[in-house]
């Protein structure tokens, strides 16, 4: 008697997005959930593709989850010029487009150079993107072997979109914080008012509620131990302090996750794709924070010099 092949049930929109090995488990996530979306697959990788894709068809032949080489798809001539994280997205821009030009690269910088936007990225203002979405994802969150990813989404094909592996310890909260960090790093020299939308109440509370308490008690938790993710939180807080001193307006706005809001869904997709990328080295968050402090001191000295030269100080 031949062995019955198992199915993989992918809940794309439901109470908890994920892949389940039984129909009953999938039903628990989708039954009665408004706008639920789910499918079953013979191959787990196809189920993973379905969850992070923006289309509904199965049978994807180009995987966005290769651990060895995720790559970046650069569309030089197509419907929308830009950098895309998956072959599916790239196909939408080039399919049946006369004279299309595109190429896959192992690094984002090479892809940017190919389409002639590498230098522009460094100076481009976010004048047409006053709202940005960020998210973190973690497969097996809280368990041994968890893998986390970071996602930032501005708009379709935007070169500022980010999909990367979470560095260091793997957890959803860390990934959420680092996504916020990436947005602040990207936009430090942009003057346009910015709204950052995130589904992480934890991240928002860290910056807008708990930070004041931690600054007074030496970043200690309620049990007298150092808080989780202290180095990242202090670096992010310093970035936001610099933003305020520069006179910029950056608001954190909570958005409920997995409710069909495109920006949030896209950021989640980019974060999920980041979980399939190779491990990356943990940055020295303390050194990064000190670099920001140095820049702030230089900027303060320059402002004082200008005031003195103008005779107003």
Image (cartoon, rainbow, N blue to C red):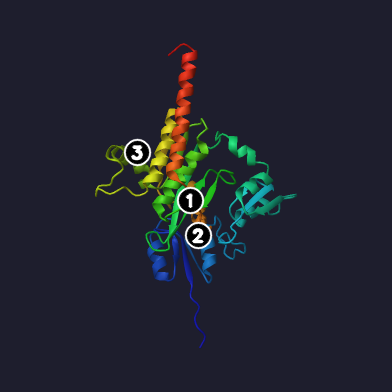
Mark whose residue sits in front, 2 or 3: 3
> Where 299 falls versus 75 (above or below)?
above
Where is residue 181 drawn, in percent x and y? 46, 43
Residue 296 seen in the current view: yes
Question: Which is nearer the N-term, disc 1 or disc 3?
Answer: 1
Q: Disc 1 and disc 2: Cα gap in Å?
A: 16 Å
Spot occupied by residue 194 in the image (x, y as percentages of width and height): 47, 35
Numbered mark located on residue 208 in the image: 3
Residue 114 lies, with reference to residue 298, above or below; the image says below
Question: Would residue 174 appear left or right of 222 to someone viewing this image?
Answer: right
Q: Of marks 1 and 2, which one's residue comes earlier in the chain?
A: 2
Of labels 2 and 3, earlier in sequence is 2
- Look at mark 1 in the image and give the residue it sits on: 150
How would you rate the neighbour count of disc 1 (Cα within 10 Å): few for under 14, some for 14-19, many for 20 or more? many
Residue named by callout 2: 51
Q: In which quarter of the image is residue 241?
A: top left
The quarter holding residue 17 reads: bottom left
Q: Is mark 1 on a helix, strand or loop?
A: strand
* Above or below: residue 257 compared with residue 251: below
Taking the spot 68% from the left edge, 42% from the top edge, the residue there is 116
Q: Is residue 52 left or right of residue 76?
A: left
Instruction: Give the residue furthest to the right.
Output: 99
Residue 247, x across and y down, in percent? 45, 27
| Left or right, residue 165 beside residue 32 | right
In this rendering, does residue 246 appear at all? no
**Residue occupying image coordinates x 25% and y 48%:** 224
Residue at the limit of the structure toward the left, as seen here: 223
Q: Residue 227 carries which label?
A: none
Judge the density around disc 2: few (<14), some (14-19), many (≥20) Cα neighbours within 10 Å.
many
> How far apart are the alpha carbons under marks 2 and 3?
32 Å
Q: What element carries label 3?
A: helix
Would you call the spot at circle 3 few (<14 residues within 10 Å), some (14-19), or many (20 or more)?
few
């Amino acid at each position: 008697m031949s062995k019955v092949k198992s199915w993989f049930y992918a809940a794309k929109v439901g109470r908890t997005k994920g892949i389940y090995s039984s129909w009953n488990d999938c039903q628990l996530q989708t039954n009665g959930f408004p706008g639920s979306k789910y499918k079953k697959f013979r191959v787990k990788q196809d189920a993973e593709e379905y969850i992070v894709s923006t289309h509904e068809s199965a049978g994807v032949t180009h995987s966005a989850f290769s651990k060895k080489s995720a790559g970046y798809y650069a569309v030089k001539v197509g419907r929308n010029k830009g950098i895309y994280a998956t072959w599916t997205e790239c196909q939408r821009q080039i399919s049946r487009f006369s004279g299309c030009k595109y190429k896959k690269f192992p690094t984002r910088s090479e892809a940017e150079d190919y389409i002639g936007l590498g230098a522009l990225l460094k100076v481009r203002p976010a004048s047409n993107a006053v709202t940005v979405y960020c998210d973190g994802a973690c497969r097996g969150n809280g368990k041994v072997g968890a893998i986390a990813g970071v996602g930032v989404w501005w708009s379709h094909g935007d070169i500022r979109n980010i999909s990367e592996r979470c560095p260091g310890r793997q957890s959803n909260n860390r990934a959420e914080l680092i996504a916020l960090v990436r947005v602040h790093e990207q936009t430090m020299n942009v003057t346009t008012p910015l709204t950052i939308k995130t589904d992480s109440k934890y991240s928002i509370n860290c910056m807008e509620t708990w930070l004041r308490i931690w600054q007074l008690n030496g970043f200690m938790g309620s049990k007298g131990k150092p808080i989780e993710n202290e180095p990242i939180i202090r670096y992010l807080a310093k970035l936001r302090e610099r933003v305020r001193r520069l006179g910029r307006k950056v608001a954190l706005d909570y958005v409920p996750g997995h409710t069909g809001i495109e920006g949030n869904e896209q950021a989640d997709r980019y974060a999920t794709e980041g979980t399939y990328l190779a491990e990356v080295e943990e940055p020295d968050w303390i050194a990064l924070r000190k670099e920001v402090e140095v820049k702030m001191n230089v900027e303060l000295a320059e402002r004082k010099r200008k005031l003195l030269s103008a005779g107003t100080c």
